[in-house]
Image (spheres, grey):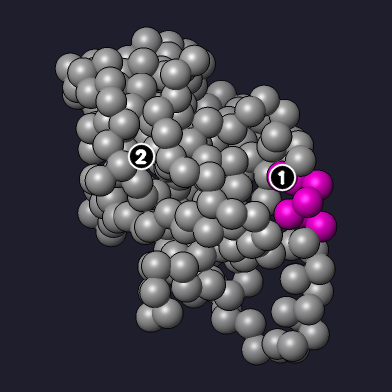
Amino acid sequence: IPVVPTAHYAMGGVPTDLQARVVAPGPDGPETIVPGFYAAGEAACVSVHGANRLGSNSLLDIMVFGKEGGARMAEDCRERGETWPELPAEAFQEGIDEVKRLVDGGGKARLGNIIERLRRSMSEHCGVFRIAEDLGHQMDILAELDGEARDLGIQDKDPTFNLDLIEAVELERMLLVARSITTGAQARTESRGGHYRDDFPGRDDERWLKHTLAFLEPDGSIRLDFKPVRMTPLSAPTVPLAPREY
């Protein structure tokens, strides 16, 4: 299943259907429902806003699809009873091992330095306006930061209310998301909505009218896949695509 968001046609997020159920390429096609997995609001990509979501529309998303998702969850629980798929035991063990490594390890790298460099470099090289050279440079920076994060050490060893530990775990996810965003931006050789390539300023509907999906491979690499954009609204005629001239 997709584990990280990237440069979607509809801004980004975990892909879902209209009932907040997460979908991924599978035996039923590019939008196969992942049992027991739901997302709504900023985390989700329902694809109702196109490529340039207006400000505060994510609040509308969470109210509408949060309600729809809650109702769908209740219905799914009634239908499935005790037949939900169980998480593999190794998934729990991986989480335990990660926490032990961060708490018990004697790493020299400091959390604040890595987070600040990650924020600054992503803003500088992978903002709304992007070019291939900057994106390639950012991938090198992310590889360097990822190496430093492997030698991360936290000063707070307390097992309760440990904000250092929480932020350290979040950092590894932030690096993964940053890598997926940059990889998706490198691949999409066009400009669309919130993704603007100065070296490819035009929109290319023939090649890029599709969602970009990012998958984490077992070797730690990011694999990109794609799914088509559904252009038929439920209750209104499709608005013809046209260049944005404002």
Frontmost residue, 23 versus 49: 49
Please state the horizontal and vertical placement of residue 177, each as a whole percent of the image: 43, 37
Residue at figure coordinates x 39%, y 49% from the top left? 211
Please state the horizontal and vertical placement of residue 114, each as a whole percent of the image: 42, 19
What is the magenta range? 61-67
> Within 10 Å of the Cα at label 2, are there few (<14), some (14-19), or many (20+) other Cα atoms?
many
Q: Disc 1 marks which residue?
A: 61
Please state the horizontal and vertical placement of residue 38, each as a whole percent of the image: 64, 61
Vertical relation: 208 (above or below) 84: above
Residue 207 appears in which quarter of the rendering? top left
Frontmost residue, 205 versus 238: 238
Frontmost residue, 161 versus 42: 42
Residue at figure coordinates x 81%, y 47% from the top left? 63
Q: Quadrant of the N terminus?
A: bottom left
Q: Disc 2 marks which residue?
A: 180
Vertical relation: 46 (above or below) 178: below
| Mark 2 or 1: the one toward you | 1
Please state the horizontal and vertical placement of residue 14, each as a whole percent of the image: 52, 51
Residue at figure coordinates x 27%, y 16% from the top left? 198
Q: Secondary structure at mark 2?
A: helix
Residue 66 part of the magenta-drawn span: yes
